[in-house]
Each structure stands twice: as structure tokens, then as C-alpha cells.
Image: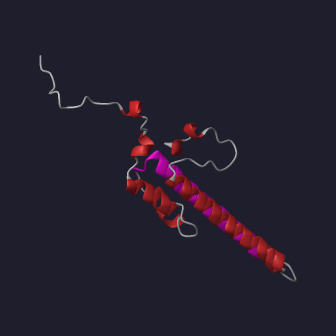
Amino acid sequence: MHQPPEDVPPLIDRTELGVRDRDLDPIGSRLRLYLYYAPIAGWLPALLALRRSGLDEREFVAAKRSVQLAIGWAIGLAVGSTVSEQLANPSLSFLLLQSAWTSTYCLICVGLMVSVWRRRSWAIGPGRGRSGDRPDSG
């Protein structure tokens, strides 16, 4: 029988050390997620990534979420502009409302970027289960 030399440590299972697959995430993948979640401009690389094949599930979910957020933000601004054109006197409070809409969009994007940095999942919208049940959690 062949025995390994004594100075070679035995192979250790990653689960015994508490290391998960998402902890071994390559840096490039996380940087792409940061890029997708960048406010105002991140939707374009996300849209281009969605047209590409071979995305892993986590990157697909992030790109889709980024495009959906940008579309919602743009629709909100378009509706706000249309309503303000119909008003005889667009008030300061309406401009503040549009400003708050853009600030909320940017804060959500920054929150998603922080969740990528912390390697956590951040659910948006109703009907989201525990973070371990979602494809972008690990």
C-alpha cells in the first residue's frame, strides 16, 4: 500500500471550515455586479450582459434587477414630467418629489452595491423568501 508522506496535510473539506461557494467568488464577477448596480449608468452594461449568453444565475439576476430598476426610475421621471407639463404652475413641491424619486433610486442602487460588497443578498419586492432560497444569494 502507498501511504502519503507525513509532511503532507490531508485534504480538508471546505464545508468543515465553514467556507461557502459564494466566499470563493472571483473578484471579476463581483466587479461586474458593482458595475451593473451603478446608479444612472449601470443599466447599459447590465442590458448588454443580458444579451450575452453564458451568464451565471447570480449575474443574470443582478443584471435583470438593474435594468428593471432603471426602467422604473425612467418611467417615474417621464410620468412626473408629463404631469408637471399639465399643471399651470409647477410647484417646488413637485420638483422635490422628482428629486426624491431619483434619490430613492440611487439609494437602492448603493444598497445593492453594499450587499455585493458584504456578499449578502438584498431582496426587493414582495414575495421574496429567505436569502438562502434566492439564486443571487450564493
Residue at the limit of the structure toward the front, as seen here: 7
23 sits to left or right of 99: left
Residue 102 vertical position relative to residue 136 in the rendered view, above or below: below
Rendered location of residue 4, percent (x, y): 16, 25
Residue 32 vertical position relative to residue 131 in the rendered view, above or below: below
107 sits to left or right of 10: right
Quadrant for the N terminus, please. Answer: top left
Foreground residue, 6 or 116? Answer: 6
Residue at the limit of the structure toward the top, as seen here: 1
Q: What residue do we see at 55% from left, 57% from top?
A: 114
Q: What residue do we see at 47% from left, 51% from top?
A: 59
Q: Which range is magenta?
A: 54-82
Residue at the limit of the structure toward the right, as seen here: 88
* Magenta-drawn stretch, dominant element (helix, strand or loop): helix
Residue 20 vertical position relative to residue 76 in the rendered view, above or below: above
Judge whether residue 71 can be spotted in this image.
Answer: no
47 sits to left or right of 103: left
Foreground residue, 35 or 55? Answer: 35
Residue at the limit of the structure toward the left, as seen here: 1
Residue 29 vertical position relative to residue 24 in the rendered view, above or below: below
Judge whether residue 94 can be spotted in this image.
Answer: yes
Rendered location of residue 130, percent (x, y): 61, 38
Rendered location of residue 6, percent (x, y): 17, 27
Q: Is residue 71 magenta?
A: yes
